[in-house]
Image (cartoon, grey):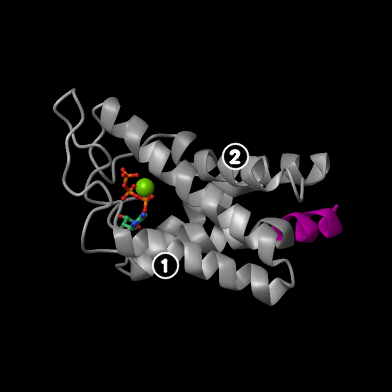
């Protein structure tokens, strides 16, 4: 079991890195260019930035290259950023402000998209996918708590 956990974390590492990098390197111009959806709310909001997207994709890709699995790294990173942005889109539609909580969506959304994007060329073993669905929310909440303590991030 510990071996399977390590293998699962190794598999998903580019996605985790892509998800974390924007917290450090993000900011500046919003991805949605300040545009509003038909409901009068922002498309994505100010917390999804161009720099965050580019840093997430780059850091995730570099992680994949260093792991010797460039294409997987690319797909996991793209899936992560698509899932993360889609999550913000859905949160805005639900009237949740940027940085507000959306349980499950915030912790699992990016993961499920990362796995789905990587699946065609490098599908996760079912046990690894199961482990990741269980441990990702725990790691996500723990890393957000650390980021808050370090002053990198406002909420959980
Ligand atoms: N971030 C960014 N660009 C992105 C994704 C994230 O700049 N494409 C940065 C923002 O500073 C954001 C932080 O990373 O506040 C944490 O990301 P996340 O938790 O996904 O965003 P939230 O602040 O919760 O905003 P939202 O409600 O839109 O999900
Ligand atoms: Mg958040």
Using the numbered discs, state the Cα–Cα distance from disc 2 to disc 1 in whole angstroms.
Answer: 20 Å
Quarter of the image for residue 115 reads: top right
> Does residue 148 appear anywhere in the picture?
no
Q: From what the image shows, is residue 106 above or below residue 63?
A: above
| Front disc: 2 or 1 | 1
Task: Label 1, secondary structure: give it.
Answer: helix
Q: Residue at 33% of width from left, 35% of height from top?
A: 89
Taking the image as shown, residue 62 lies to the left or right of residue 8, namely: left
Quarter of the image for residue 37 reads: top left
Q: From what the image shows, is residue 108 above or below residue 11?
A: above
Task: Label 2, secondary structure: give it.
Answer: helix
Magenta stretch mostly in which secondary structure? helix
* Frontmost residue, 48 versus 127: 48
**Residue 74, position as x, y percentages in the image:** 60, 60
* Frontmost residue, 121 versus 16: 121
* Frontmost residue, 63 versus 102: 63
> Is residue 87 a member of the stretch shown in magenta?
no
Q: From what the image shows, is residue 92 above or below residue 20?
A: above
Q: Which mark is residue 8?
A: none
Taking the image as shown, residue 111 lies to the left or right of residue 2, namely: left
Magenta segment, which residues?
Answer: 1-9
Determine which residue is flagged by label 2: 112
**Residue 21, position as x, y percentages in the image:** 44, 66
Q: Residue at 51% of width from left, 61% of height from top?
A: 18
Q: Residue at 28% of width from left, 41% of height from top?
A: 44
N-term-proximal mark, 2 vs 1: 1
Q: Residue at 29% of width from left, 56% of height from top?
A: 49
Mark 1 within 8 Å of ligand 1, using the beta carbon: yes
Q: Which mark is residue 55?
A: 1
């Amino acid at each position: 079991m510990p071996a399977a956990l390590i293998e699962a974390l190794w598999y998903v590492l580019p996605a985790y890195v892509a998800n974390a990098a924007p917290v450090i390197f993000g900011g500046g111009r919003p991805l949605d260019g300040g545009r509003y959806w038909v409901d009068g709310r922002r498309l994505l909001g100010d917390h999804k930035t161009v720099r965050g997207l580019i840093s997430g994709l780059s850091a995730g890709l570099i992680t994949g290259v260093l792991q010797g699995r460039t294409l997987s790294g690319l797909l996991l990173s793209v899936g992560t950023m698509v899932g993360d942005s889609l999550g913000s889109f859905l949160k805005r539609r639900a009237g949740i402000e940027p940085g507000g909580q959306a349980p499950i969506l915030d912790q699992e959304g990016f993961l499920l998209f990362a796995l789905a994007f990587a699946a065609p060329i490098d599908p996760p073993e079912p046990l690894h996918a199961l482990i990741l669905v269980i441990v990702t929310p725990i790691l996500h909440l723990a890393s957000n708590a650390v980021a808050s303590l370090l002053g990198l991030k406002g909420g959980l």
